[in-house]
Amino acid sequence: MSFSELVDVVSKLVTIAVGLLTIKIYFDNKK
């Protein structure tokens, strides 16, 4: 795997993680 591919995968994972964290915080605050 090349470095650019690794960066692409990591950036996708970070985006997903941030999205899930945002949703979790949103629902925690609604209670």
Image (cartoon, rainbow, N blue to C red):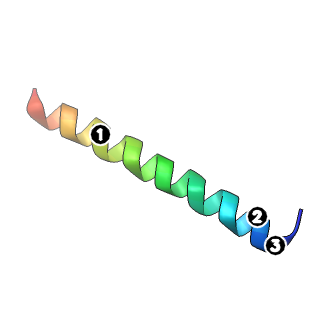
Earlier-in-chain disc, 1 versus 2: 2
Is 4 above or below relative to 8? below
How many neighbours does mark 3 have within 10 angstroms: few (below 14), some (14-19), or many (20 or more)?
few
The crowd level at tag 2 (other Cα within 10 Å; few <14, some 14-19, many 20+) is few
Q: For residue 3, which numbered disc appears in the image?
A: 3
The residue at the far right in this view is 1
- Total count of labels: 3
Q: Secondary structure at mark 3?
A: helix
Spatial distance from mark 3 to mark 1, Cα to Cα? 30 Å
In what element is the residue under mark 2? helix
Q: Which mark is residue 6?
A: 2
Going by the numbered disc 2, the residue's amino acid type is Leu
Position of residue 12 measured from the top left corner of the image (x, y, whole percent): 58, 56
Task: Confirm or deny contact between disc 3 and disc 2 (CB under 8 A).
Answer: yes
Q: Position of residue 13 (x, y in %)?
A: 58, 52
Q: Are discs 3 and 1 less than 8 Å apart at CB? A: no
Q: For the C terminus, give its image quadrant.
A: top left
The quadrant of the image that shows the N terminus is bottom right
